[in-house]
Amino acid sequence: MSAGKSLCIIGGIITLIAVYLTSWIASYGLLKVYGMGGIFSLGDLFLYAESEAIDLNIPVWSVYIVGIGVVLTLGSGVLILLGTKSRAPAIIGAIFPLFIGIMLLLFTLNIYIFDYLYIILAVFTTIEPLIPGVDMIPIIYDIANISLGLILLLAGSLLGLIGGIVGPE
């Protein structure tokens, strides 16, 4: 098996775990920031795009771009795993979680360079656990004020990007 395939498999599995089972920001009160929050708010994001754009004082097209980014982030682990057959899905699947991971890393370090970061936080934030009555998922663990889920999200998407660039040959 080539190095590109191996990196895509490892990166895809790590990204799937990071998106669906771990919280990306550990100390955000009772709220959890992870992929299931994106699933819970995805319908409202597209249905009420105009009202959300007016509330946030942003153009409507940017709300739709955030929605497309959410969909690609939720499917990023699968896209990276599809990178074992072709380069393009791995690269596309790695770009959005890497972007969101870098933005959230800068947020945890109190560096604000992106105005739409609060939209990303609002879309992926939920108070509901993955399984009702089980509060241990998403896994919330802090390593030096940076969440384990954020580290896994960055590592998995970076491995997927490198595996996509190397290719499955």
Image (tube, grey):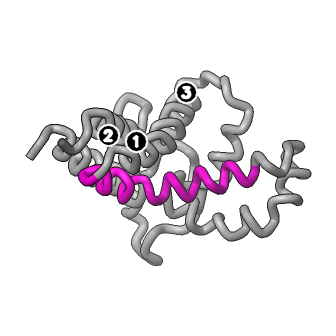
Please state which of residues 30 and 150 is positioned toward the viewer in this rendering.
150
Q: How many marks?
A: 3
Which of discs 3 and 2 lies nearer the camera? The answer is: 2
Q: Where residue 86 sits: x, y (%)?
A: 31, 50
Q: Residue 91, which numbered label?
A: 1
Disc 3 or 1, which lies upstream in sequence?
Answer: 1
The residue identified by callout 3 is 106
The residue identified by callout 2 is 164
Most common SS among magenta residues: helix
Q: What element does badge 3 sit on?
A: helix
Q: Where residue 158 sits: x, y (%)?
A: 35, 35
Near mark 3 (Cα within 10 A), the count class, few <14, some 14-19 or many ≥20, is some
Residue located at (88% from left, 59% from top): 51
Residue 58 lies within the magenta run:
no
Task: Read off the magenta span.
Answer: 63-85
Disc 1 or 2, which lies upstream in sequence?
Answer: 1
Marks 3 and 1, how far apart in space? 22 Å
Residue located at (71% from left, 38% from top): 116
The type of residue carrying mark 3 is: Leu
Residue 120 in the image: above or below residue 51: above
